Amino acid sequence: MARLALVTDSVCTIPQELQEEYQITIVPMSFLLEETTYVDNGSLNWLEFYALLKSARRLPTTAAPSPGAFFDAFREVYQQGSREVLCIVTSSQLTATYNAACDGARLARHELADMRIKVIDSRCAAAALGFVVLTAARAAASGVSLEEAANKAEALIPRMYMLGFLGTLEYVAKGGRVPQVAAWLSALLKMKHIFQLHDGNIIRLGAVRTNPKAMDRLLQLASQRLNRRKPLHVAVFHTRAVDAAEALANRVREEFRPAELFVSEFSQVMSIHTGPGLIGLSFYNDP
């Protein structure tokens, strides 16, 4: 393993081949579903996951990795030869993962005296987090220092956008984030609620009826935020909506001609809060 290692959490949705290419270590989150605790690493197959989620009497609870889990990850890469670690995790406004990673780093510094660790709050999630991690990993692979890789990651965060729409408000309502009556009306009217996550802030950008109209709106919003004169990186994300995600990816490819484009599925921890049918895109321009 390289001297500088990259560590992140399972919300990142980085494609498996890129995880392996850059030797990125993933620390999984977990969730409690029907009195059974599962690790967010795909060990529970998706069909079974959604069947259990649909029938659950209560919305499952999710949990950040423990400080000990991060310590174990730091110790593992140390044993493989890395003496520097850049750990980039999901926004601290969404989860306690950042605090757990900081606590794990303190434990590692105490026991592994010659190890240097920097933890970054990405202020984003899912594929947006994945892009921040990949930017740092690519910098690390080129031989830069820990500080230089961290600077590249931190410089990307304000340029990183995440836009999406929910296929249903059912699971958001189960979590108490919207009233049940709002979810019922939304389902009745087939409304698709559009949101943005940017630099740590989540805002609602309205609602439209039907998936095609929602996709049109996503592309319009993306066009307002990107720079067509600079290289563009895009990840289309979804929850159990492969065909719709591939259709959106094709439109992105035709309309924006990105330098990089991939499709990824939300982790199960994230899917608990959104349910199936979520579709969106994360993107940024090179400086």
Image (spheres, rainbow, N blue to C red):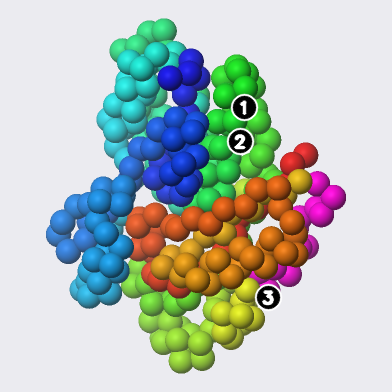
Q: Is residue 228 magenta?
A: yes
- Exactly how many numbered labels are in the figure? 3
Judge the density around disc 3: few (<14), some (14-19), many (≥20) Cα neighbours within 10 Å.
some
In the depicted structure, whether residue 190 falls above or below residue 136: below
In the depicted structure, whether residue 272 falls above or below residue 21: below
- Over which residues does the magenta segment extend? 216-230
Q: Residue furthest toward the right?
A: 229
Q: Is residue 151 magenta?
A: no
In the picture, the quarter occupied by the N terminus is top left
Q: Which residue is mark 1?
A: 139
Residue 165 lies in quadrant: bottom right
Q: Nearer the viewer, residue 227 or 196?
A: 227
Amino acid on which disc 1 is placed: Ala
Magenta part mainly helix, strand or loop?
A: helix
Distance between the alpha carbons at the discs numbered 3 and 2? 29 Å
Judge the density around disc 1: few (<14), some (14-19), many (≥20) Cα neighbours within 10 Å.
many
Q: Let me know if residue 201 appears in the view.
A: no
Q: Decide which of tag 3 and tag 2 comes sooner along the chain.
A: 2
Numbered tag placed on residue 216 in the rendering: 3
Q: Nearer the viewer, residue 26 or 95?
A: 26
**SS for dot 1:** helix
Q: Residue furthest toward the bottom?
A: 188
At horizontal 61% and vertical 63% (from top left) the residue drawn is: 249
Q: Which residue is mark 2?
A: 135
In the picture, the quarter occupied by the C terminus is top right
Distance between the alpha carbons at the discs numbered 3 and 1? 34 Å
Numbered tag placed on residue 264 in the rendering: none
Q: Position of residue 72 (x, y in %)?
A: 29, 26
Q: Nearer the viewer, residue 245 or 216?
A: 245
Residue 212 lies in quadrant: bottom right
At horizontal 56% and vertical 37% (from top left) the residue drawn is: 134
